[in-house]
Image: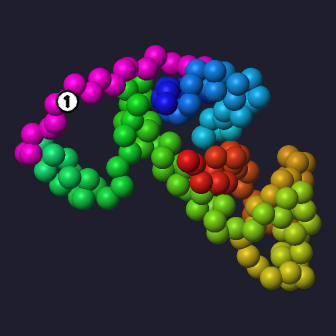
Amino acid sequence: MKVLDLHCAQGHAFEGWFGSEADFQSQLARDLVQCPLCGSSEIRKGLSAPRLNLGASPSPAAAAARASEADAAGTAVAAPPSMPMGDAALHAAWLRMARHIVANTEDVGPRFAQEARRMHHGEAEERGIRGQASAQEAAQLLEEGIAVLPLALPDAAKKTLQ
């Protein structure tokens, strides 16, 4: 198993796990490797620090301290060495928010503008929806007093990461 530090064209850093270098190159060539934050498939490998398992185990005090910190913090996010913790926490929060939106809205696809208007005029039940609209359609909805928020959701936010 190869664990690679990857970077997209926007500078987002993330980790990818592959069966081999050939597996990574094959997936990269088919645009199957995407940034989980922006969906870009323009990916490059960064420098990765090797993991050396030399048989040493942490002292019981250090293990207890880590467990105590994890319990107090709830969910922890580990930043790759190339990313400051502030950025990793921000990226993780953004992905949680995007997944929350996906889980709590209905995808109406290209019918977004029509469905938003139907809800606004009382022709359809009010509910959270998401979908695609052109910039012109979004501007028209705003002019009509219909609140919309453009938000790019990468495919990674729409499904469970393995």
Residue 45 within the magenta-colored segment of the rendering = yes
Return the residue at label 1.
55
**Residue occupying image coordinates x 69% and y 47%:** 155
**Residue occupying image coordinates x 62% and y 35%:** 35
Q: Determine crowd level at label 1: few under 14, some 14-19, many 20+ residues with C-alpha closer than 10 A.
A: few
Up-down: is 83 above or below 122? above
Residue 146 within the magenta-colored segment of the rendering = no
Up-down: is 28 above or below 39? above
Q: In the visual, does 71 lie left or right of 148?
A: left
Query: Is residue 29 at least partly visible in the picture?
Result: yes
Between residue 149 and residue 43, name the one nearer to us: 43
Percent coordinates x, y for residue 158 in the rendering: 67, 54
- Determine which quarter of the picture holds residue 53: top left
Looking at the image, how many numbered discs can be counted on the residues? 1
**Residue occupying image coordinates x 50% and y 27%:** 2
**Residue occupying image coordinates x 57% and y 25%:** 20
Q: Could you tell me the amino acid type at mark 1? A: Gly
Colour basis = rainbow
Percent coordinates x, y for residue 50 in the rendering: 37, 20
Question: Which residues lie in the magenta part?
Answer: 41-61
Percent coordinates x, y for residue 119 in the rendering: 84, 76
Q: In the visual, does 122 lie left or right of 159?
A: right
Percent coordinates x, y for residue 56 in the rendering: 16, 31
Up-down: is 147 above or below 9? below
Q: Seen from this angle, which residue lies furthest top?
A: 47
Query: Is residue 41 at least partly visible in the picture?
Result: no
